[in-house]
Amino acid sequence: QVHLVESGGGLVQAGGSLRLSCAASGNIISINAVGWYRQAPGKERELVAQMASGGSTTYADSVKERFTISRDNAKNTVYLQMNSLKPEDTAVYFCNVWIKVVARPTGSYWGQGTQVTVSS
């Protein structure tokens, strides 16, 4: 079984920064693609950033040059560094990780979500 624990959300003023973390635990053999999504009230969940197993990254246009996705394979942890935050970045942020675990095929796992609120 795999557990994902997110942390790092909170309230910040516009222009500020936050770093989200997503730590995976369990019978993990390897972590493949990783990503961060967000969902604002009344809106659909959208992709914010993703990193392929080979390290290539993709960002939503709205966060390019401000957000950076990274990973620490030794710690089974994924990060999202968010700089120059704007009120429109306010949302619940979810990590999504493709993980190969013992005796099971690679599967997609979601974090519990962490609230990010940016005040103007």
Image (cartoon, rainbow, N blue to C red):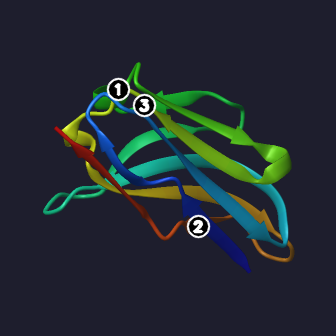
Q: Which mark is residue 59?
A: 3
Task: Name above or below for residue 68 compared with residue 98.
Answer: above
Look at mark 2 in the image and give the residue it sits on: 109
Look at mark 1 in the image and give the residue it sits on: 84
Of the 4 image quadrants, the one containing the C terminus is: top left
Determine the residue located farthest toward the bottom in the rendered image: 1
On the image, the x and y values in percent for residue 96 come to: 54, 57
Marked residue nearer the N-terminal end (3 or 2): 3
Viewer-nearest residue: 101 or 6: 6
In terms of image quadrants, where is residue 44?
Answer: bottom left
User: What kind of element bears circle 2?
Assistant: strand
Asked whether the beta carbons under mark 1 and mark 2 sit within 8 Å of each other, the answer is no
Determine the residue located farthest toward the top in the rendered image: 65
Q: CA distance from mark 1 to mark 2?
A: 29 Å
Q: Is residue 87 left or right of residue 47?
A: left
- Badge 3: residue crowd in 10 Å (few <14, some 14–19, many ≥20): some
